[in-house]
Amino acid sequence: MSFFRPDRMIAFGVVAVVVALLPALLPAYASFELTYVAAYAIAILGLIILTGKNGQISLGHGAFIAIGGYTVAVLASKAGLPYWVGIPAAGVLAGLIGIGIGVVALRLEGVYLALATFALAVSVPSLLKRFSGLTGGVGGIVLTPVAPPAGLAIDPERWFYYVAWAIAGVLFILTAVLLEGRLGRSLRALRDNEIAAISYGVNPHFYKTLAFAWSAAYAGIAGALIAIATAFVSPDSYGFNLSITVLIGAVLGGLESLWGAVLGGLVVEFLPLWAQKINDAAPSVVYGVALIAVMLLMPGGIAGTLIRLVRGRRDPAGAGGASVQAESTAVVTVPVAPVE
């Protein structure tokens, strides 16, 4: 598989080494902030699968993040289950709900699909407040701060930093491998030309629903990590702004490449913090300006632009760009065996 090409493995190895060394070079609070970057990167990775690879638009991923956060919180506070049980459970529950949303999405496209997911994002916080016996209502649920294993000489912030980035790394590798195979080709075929994809045996109902469930599961895992890091969940933490923030992070980072998820996570976490130093109202303005600038100057996002620059240096004559274009157009014409 092309994922295991030497250049990709070297890039992944460099990133892994940097991630491993950063806690030793940065203070504990910086590791705490980078933990959120890993969580947001996982959520944005789900949007790259859904929107970037399959062409479906979601304005409701904040709802799946809320489902993941409350799953781990309820299991820990009500059932006394450890966090390592709650994290995969959050992904499974969010994925199952994503299947239901994906089935509904089969009948919707474009702005209508966006409005349906928008309704989901708006309704979930109200539902969380209504079932106060389970969710704690407006007051939310306070969680026990995460602690490293006994005998391990590391502070909690750095320990959970490694846990979050290890989970992110596994999901990134899994996603890259799956997208290089038949699954990824089918998703891209439906995105580029659904009629042609169907004529070659691609089942749109199966793959579109799968994309929604896959993306929702990642958002649920991200929500669980955010809840554990914060040690608190409340309905007000999962408003519609969260869905928009994650989507903007995906667009700014780049929907063309999985590396866009990491860059988008950095944008989501640090851009508002830097903007607040200018003015308390600056984050919204900065987000808007950054989004417009990227769409005009870097339509492929930050990651897409960087990748094109690197490929341009390797192949100044432009053959590399031609091969990339040929690969993207060939996706639709590659026969895919029908799905029973």
Image (cartoon, rainbow, N blue to C red):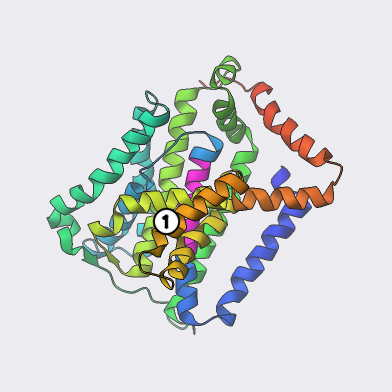
The percent position of residue 254, horizontal first and vertical second, equals 57, 48
Q: Answer left or right for 182 relative to 227.
A: right
Q: Answer left or right for 31 relative to 336.
A: left
**Residue at the spot 48% in from the left edge and 39% down from the top edge:** 50
Which quarter of the picture shows residue 170?
bottom right
225 or 277, nearer to the observer: 277
The percent position of residue 301, horizontal first and vertical second, equals 59, 49
Please check the rendered image and state whether residue 155 is part of the magenta-colored stretch, yes or no: no
Which quarter of the picture shows residue 200?
top right
The residues colored magenta run 37-50
Q: Callout 1, which amino acid?
A: Ala
Please check the rendered image and state whether residue 40 is part of the magenta-colored stretch, yes or no: yes
**Residue at the spot 63% in from the left edge and 23% down from the top edge:** 336
192 or 169, nearer to the observer: 192
Q: Which residue is mark 1?
A: 222
The percent position of residue 36, horizontal first and vertical second, equals 45, 65
The percent position of residue 13, horizontal first and vertical second, equals 69, 62
Please tell me whether residue 274 is drawn above or below residue 155 in the rendered image. above
